Image: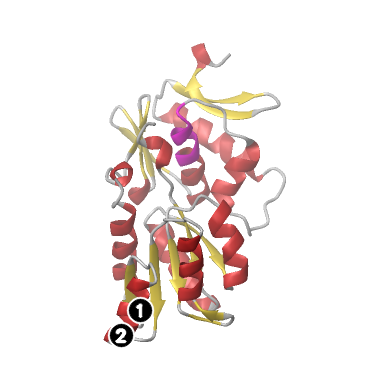
Amino acid sequence: MSRNSQLSYRIALVEDHERMAALIQRAMAMSGVAVDVFQTQASAWYGLRTGGYALAIIDRGLGDGDGLGLVRRLRAAGQQMPCLMLTARDALHDRVAGLEAGADDYLPKPFAMEELVARVRALMRRPPELRDLQLVHGDLVVSPESASLECGGERVGLAPAELQIVICLVRAEGNVVRRASLEAAAWGSHEAVTPNALDVALHRLRRKLEAIGSQLSLVNIRGLGFALRRVDVAA
């Protein structure tokens, strides 16, 4: 399995404080990482098991119980995604309890968003497949941290949804990605998406690929989905 196939730049945030969740989403987006927010353990349980997230940020002080319960449940189910705990508790025994429950890192409140981003990116680098945070496919290089797409020295910036779509297509390495998968990558599982939002984003990406002179094209495989491949092998 190639190194690109295991990369994911969408994480889950289990946080019931709306303003805090919005601040974290904004900070992570500026680092090229998309965030889906779950407000309860109950809603997060299904999403974390099925969403293919690279990492979960979980607040201990949730309305439906201690977030450590969710971590224990995930670990018991064999889910090994890294978990970063947020908490207002800073006592040593609380940190020890979090790590023993299966958490990978522990960040007490209040914290600087820069530190949160650094902790998240450090956890994302831990597996060997995630050490290089650039993705390469054909003549393209995708840099999530700078939200850019590069080909032969030419570089173009990407909007947040465009970045997640490109990452999804690059990870597929020329294979077809279904429309629903691209929409989920770009806008997550909660955000309402207009029927033509993906078409608009794909149109913009096609223009950007042309602008940087890539030999790869966004190909519509009718009835199946989309692929990022050379036109001469699109059939």
Disc 2 designates what residue?
93
Q: Residue 233 carries which label?
A: none
Residue 38: x percent and y percent? Answer: 57, 67
Q: Of 220 and 126, which appears nearest the observer? A: 126
Residue type beneath disc 1: Ala
The residue positioned 47% from the left and 56% from the top of the image is: 79
User: Which of the two residues, 137 or 26, is positioned nearer the viewer here?
Assistant: 137
Q: Where is residue 58 in the image (x, y as percent from the top left)?
A: 46, 70
The region drawn magenta spans: 167-173
Are the residues tagged 1 and 2 within 8 Å (C-beta)? yes
> Any magenta on residue 35?
no
Instruction: Reply above or below: 47 against 52.
Output: below
Q: Name the residue beneath numbered marker 1.
A: 97
Left or right: where does residue 16 sit relative to residue 155? right
Using residue 189 as the reference point, say whether residue 81 is left or right of it. left
Is any part of residue 111 visible from this angle? no
